[in-house]
Amino acid sequence: MTEAHDSVSPPAHLLEVENLVKEFPVKGGGLFRRTAGVVQAVSDISFHLDPGETLGLVGESGCGKSTTGRAVLQLHKPTSGSVRYNGRELTTLTQKELRPIRRDLQIVFQDPYASLNPKMPVNDIVGEPMRVHGVRGPQVPERVADLLKRVGLAPEHGNRYPHEFSGGQRQRVGIARALALEPKVIVLDEPVSALDVSVQAGVVNLLEELQAQLGLAYLFIAHDLSVVRHISDRVAVMYLGRIVEIGTRADVYEQPSHPYTQALLSSAPIADPEKERARERIVLEGDVPSPIDPPSGCRFRTRCWKAQDICATETPELVDRGTGHPVACHFAEVRAVV
Amino acid sequence: MSTEILSVSDLTVGFPTDDGLVTAVRGVTYTLKEREVLAIVGESGSGKSVSAMALMGLLPKTARISGSIRYRDEEVLEMSPKRARAMRGQNIAMIFQDPMTSMNPVYSVGDQLAEAYRSHHRVERKVALGKAVEMLDRVGIPQAKDRARSYPHEFSGGMRQRAMIAMAIINSPDIIIADEPTTALDVTVQAQILETLIEVKDSVNAAVILITHDLGVVAGMAHRVLVMYAGRGVERAEVSDIYSRPRMPYTAGLLGSIPALDSAGGRLHPIGGAPPSLINLPPGCPFSPRCPLVSDRCQTEEPQLLATDIPNHEVACHHWEQVASAPDPTLLFRTEEVQA
């Protein structure tokens, strides 16, 4: 399975995302459903991903992390900006031109109850990507059996239907399906959020093993800060459509420098009564503003205890401000909170 | 923390279904003292919510309930419907996971709170509304007087949960049952809500039964913990002992399954398999198919919740001494590094 990508220039990274913007129109309720506004789901974000590494994308509901994952895969057409895979620009390709590239870029969804067709036996679910991409013949059932083994399921379970499996097993089926075409990049959109903790850990371990064996690059989207710390090499924190801080896992968790990152980390509970009760907690006031009408300048300023006039007038760039990694805050300063 | 206000003993709840009787709770026993926070922890289907639902009379009529629930000196399961109605809401209040579906969408938030107050106090509507505004203000809703006229859909998730808390405390209950109160919320909002819950609980001197699957939330809130598995209590202890000295393999397995927030950590040690179906429970200990310490005895004889080497720490395991002697019980679940 080799592809002849006519590469343009030797790429610096496997996946490069630059100034990505995704807006969704909001229709009014009137007769002609005129566009009444725009949800700025993802506003000008840039990051890259290398082979064999995991970039964790964290943030709360509505921060744009899932939209980012989908825009990267061209499942949502980006409004503007660039997504390059192996040096090749994806945003200008037609659906047909994209198809061979989709083999390399796969996704695993959050809800293993909704993302598997209930009418298809597991063998067909896992084999479907191969069928779609024209892989046929006797090697398909062999490969399916191999994939099921690889994700910790028995090949003889392939004749069963999704409802006969537990949540954790279903998520393993979803992972097997994503692996079917030997991808290079997998977007994992909250892959363990719907699972009980005892089951979640097994799936996390499986993802780590597969990465070590196959050299996969993961874009790991999650709201669980502990899981993200465990699995990620680098972490990007999103707030209201923007990345506010990005760095290695140690940078972000040990030297958080954006006030939002600090508040987020200090809010996440630690499963240790002694530490949990001794901690200082930064409790934010109010709620996340609407992405239809985000605050000017720094989008976090309406809830930030450090906000000054400059925060309303000047959008802080995501650059290193002397804390060793990029932070989008005019008043960035390291404050350990976990 | 002194007087016992609630005592649940050997509570069993079954639901007849087409596939047979599903026994969701199989003999649960616990007590609650004044002003304490008791956490009931378990995974989906462990029966953690069902015992609270029985207490609140929220189970369907088909449910078969046996055992005893004593609130102060009264037997809840034998109360007259009138007395039970008076107790629920007035003495025992409940906060649900999803405030969007537990509030009435066609009444304003203020009206719903006022109604909760008026069903236990003979006062004018205006007085009750005043009380509602006072409560909304106490749980940290800004401009409470104006916001009382809003409808639930006009509130954010965090605000709705605050309004739920306000409704729960409007009659100054002794007991607040919080069933996954923050599971639907983001962490920063969760922190706000938990802080509010603790503040108001102290202000009305209520005890809390906190039902959750989140061991992080338990660590910060609870005094005592009851761990449930397959419809039974399998470990009951002070909160610090649960985390530092678990005696049940299942509890140790749970602790080894959660990645740490405060360190990068090594490999996780998950519990193999999945929780059993309540229709087809294995004979003996329900955890035995997933347990690394399983012996023949475990497969025939279901262990009872009994005392251990630690005071006030009970466990339902034939092999708890083996767990106690392990230097790090979470490592009992260690598996091969890579299964090729």
Image: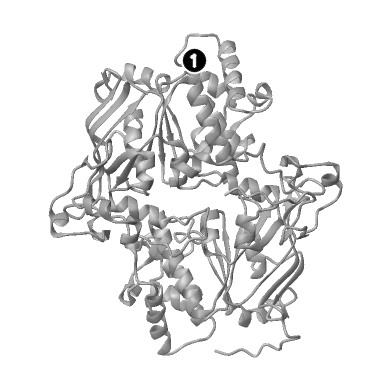
Q: Residue placed at 42% from the left, 75% from the top?
A: A124
On screen, residue B263 above or below B245: below
Q: How many marks?
A: 1
Q: Is residue A103 visible?
A: yes
The x and y percentages for residue A256 are 66, 53
Which of A322 and B235 lies nearest the eye of the viewer?
A322
Question: How many C-alpha atoms fall within 10 Å of the one at disc 1: few (<14), some, or many (≥20)?
Answer: some
Lateral position of residue A202 relative to residue B194, left or right: left
On screen, residue A338 above or below B136: below
Lateral position of residue B139 relative to residue A315, left or right: left
Which of A297 and B326 lies nearest the eye of the viewer?
B326
Lateral position of residue A224 relative to residue A311, left or right: left
On screen, residue A207 above or below A237: below
The x and y percentages for residue A132 are 53, 80
Query: In the rendered image, which residue does mark 1 sit on?
Result: B118
Find numbered disc 1 in the image and state the secondary structure of the residue it sits on. Answer: helix
| Residue B85 location, quadrant | top left
Q: Residue placed at 35% from the left, 72% from the top?
A: B336
Tag 1: residue type? Arg
Q: Residue placed at 41% from the left, 70% from the top?
A: A120
Q: Residue placed at 55% from the left, 47% from the top?
A: A268
Lateral position of residue A280 relative to residue A166, left or right: right
| Residue B1 location, quadrant | top left
The x and y percentages for residue B34 are 37, 23
Q: Chain of mark 1?
A: B
